[in-house]
């Protein structure tokens, strides 16, 4: 998977706690050339505390990299039945941040989300990363 950062201006992510419950989080930890560590991507998934199977799922994604001076974010939402809503919400948030992925991740689960985060890190110039979720 490839990622292209199309915009450096988008910043609409929100931390939805305490109104919504944080149900899933993906954080990319990358090794910098100087031997230090950074967290260039942070993706969070939220749901309402009284959610049922059809309730909306919300996501926020932050991309921050001092080396390339990239500071963007996005938010997304997904609702309905019969697919993986967290990956759909994160895919929507990534698009909202101004990032174009070569493959759709909506509804494809955690492995697609990890692939997308890896691609975003590669677009920022990182090759040695670990994703914590």
Image (tube, rainbow, N blue to C red):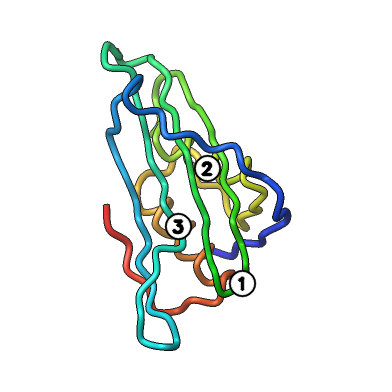
- In the image, taking residue 64 as reference, residue 6 lies left or right, namely right
Residue extending farthest to the bottom is 34
What whole-number distance in Å separates the C-alpha atoms at marks 2 and 1?
A: 23 Å
How many numbered tags mark residues here?
3
Q: Disc 3 to disc 2, how far (Cα)?
A: 13 Å
Q: Quadrant of residue 68?
A: bottom right
Residue at left 41%, top 26%?
57
Decide which of tag 2 and tag 1 comes sooner along the chain. 1
Spot occupied by residue 96 in the image (x, y as percentages of width and height):
63, 40
Residue 108 coordinates in the image, percent (x, y) = 43, 43
Q: N-terminal of the two: label 1 or label 3? A: 3
CA separation in Å, label 1 and label 3: 13 Å
Q: Is residue 68 left or right of residue 131?
A: right
Say what secondary structure mark 2 lies in: helix
Q: Who's the residue at 35% across and 19% down the image?
A: 19
The answer to which quarter of the image holds residue 1 is: bottom right
The reply, left or right, for residue 61 in relation to residue 81 is right
Mark whose residue sits in front, 2 or 1: 1
Rendered residue at 42%/34% (across/down): 15
| Residue at image point 38% right, 41% down | 44
Residue placed under numbered mark 3 in the picture: 41
From the viewer's perspective, is the residue at label 3 or at label 2 nearer? 3
Along the line of sight, the residue nearer the viewer: 119 or 28:
28
Residue 12 versus residue 10 in the image, above or below: above
Residue position for label 1:
68
How crowded is the residue under tag 3: few (<14 C-alpha within 10 Å), some, or many (20+)?
many
User: Considering only vertical position in the picture, is 124 above or below 96?
Assistant: below
Foreground residue among 112 and 40: 40
* Residue 130 to residue 109: above or below: below
The picture places residue 53, in percent across and down from the top left corner, at 31, 16
Q: Name which of mark 3 and mark 2 comes first in the sequence.
A: 3
Q: Which mark is residue 91?
A: 2
């Amino acid at each position: 998977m490839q990622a292209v950062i199309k915009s450096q201006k988008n910043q609409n992510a929100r931390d939805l706690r305490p109104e919504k419950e944080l149900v899933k989080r993906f954080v990319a930890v990358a090794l910098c050339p100087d031997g230090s560590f950074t967290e260039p991507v942070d993706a969070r998934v939220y749901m309402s505390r009284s959610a049922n199977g059809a309730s909306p799922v919300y996501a926020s994604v932050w991309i921050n990299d001092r080396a390339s001076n990239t500071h963007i974010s996005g938010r997304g939402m997904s609702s309905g039945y019969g697919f993986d809503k967290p990956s759909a919400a994160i895919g929507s948030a990534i698009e909202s941040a101004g990032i174009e992925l070569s493959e759709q991740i909506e509804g494809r689960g955690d492995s697609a989300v990890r692939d997308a985060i890896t691609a975003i890190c590669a677009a920022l110039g990182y090759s040695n990363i670990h994703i914590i979720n």
